[in-house]
Image: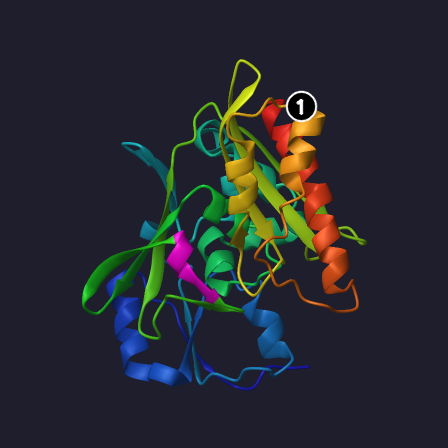
Amino acid sequence: MIPAQFDYLAPTSVDEALAALAEHGDDAKIMAGGQSLLPVLRMRLNAPEVVIDLGRIEGLRGIREDGDDLVIGAMTTHSDVGGNALVAQHAALITKAVEHLADAQVRHRGTFGGALAHADPAGDLGAPALALGASFVIAGSGGTRTVAAADFFTDVFTTAIGDDEILTEVRIPKHTGWGAHYEKFVRVSHQWAIVAVAATVRAEGGTIAEAAVGLTNMGSTPLRASAVEQALVGQPATEDAVRRAAERAAEGTEPPSDLNGDADYRRHLAGVLTRRAVLAAAAG
């Protein structure tokens, strides 16, 4: 199908973009890489009068260090994030997740912040961002504010970003030296995750000192497998110990039931994938 007619704006600064958003209000839609928005427009599931393209705002791109944080601009492409040495060194879980994200064409055009702001519970970046304790810097007419990952994802396709706000950057606490792995289950290559698990582990002498585990598509938002994390601390990084902890992966979750599998199937998958992800992360 052909999208409904709309006006196109391409501001060159965040202030210009915010002004355009304030002027057009509910009639406007923000576009980052367009990999989620354009299909929706083509199918006429959404018909905004104005599309505000952030692609010309150079200040929203790039990856840098800021003390104990790694800062990723919201308009940085997935391919740039996945190939960045700083990300691989300080937030390896993000690198691992990007490897599983769609295909090369989508990674070349899609953006890190756009995917997170889209907030698809089956998307591959929410769980890693949550597990790493990321925070989201959001700009609005009243200035900027920072929202923790635990408060950022609020429902399916819904975040803490207000209608008059724009996500500008994502700050990720450095997890230098932590092992990481993203275990994703799909039936067709490049498919949205049926279930996936993001695990990052700091091991000392074969014992798990710290662990963070995020779950993809096990609820209406990305989730932390807190019971697993607590059960892993102080345990040896062995098959039996990790399996016992992973059995608690589905606690507190509300997975969907659909054509790819019912809720019980996903709960079973969560335990299996958590075991695999944690063991792989602990192995370095």
From what the image shows, is residue 229 above or below residue 196?
above
Query: Could you tell me if residue 82 is visible in this image?
Result: no
The residue at the point 68 percent across, 57 percent down is 192
* Predominant SS along the magenta part: helix
Judge from the rendering whether residue 28 lies leftward or rightward of residue 122; answer left or right.
Answer: left
x and y, in percent, of residue 139 in the image: 27, 62
Which one is nearer the viewer's eye here, 58 or 114? 114
Q: Residue 26 vs residue 265: left or right? A: left
Task: Classify 10 Å Cα crowding around label 1: few (below 14), some (14-19), many (20 and above).
Answer: some
Q: Amino acid at mark 1?
A: Thr
Q: Secondary structure at mark 1?
A: loop
> What residue lies at 21% left-to-right and 70% top-to-bottom?
141
Would residue 179 be seen by someone viewing this image from the given angle?
A: yes
Residue 150 included in the magenta stretch of the image:
yes
Residue farthest toward the left in the current orientation of the protein: 142
Q: Residue at x 59, y 62 (%)?
A: 219
Residue lying at 66% horizontally and 49% vertically, measured from the top left? 196
- 146 is higher (above) or lower (below) than 232: below
Choose top left, top right, bottom left or bottom right for residue 206.
Answer: top right
Q: Quadrant of the N terminus?
A: bottom right
Q: Position of residue 265 (x, y in %)?
A: 77, 57
- Residue occupied by mark 1: 238
Residue 135 on image: x %, y %: 36, 49
Instruction: Give the residues drawn in magenta, as a range.
Output: 149-154
Is 182 magenta? The answer is no
Judge by depth and name the residue closer to the eye, 19 or 155: 155
Is 267 left or right of 66, judged from the image as shown?
A: right
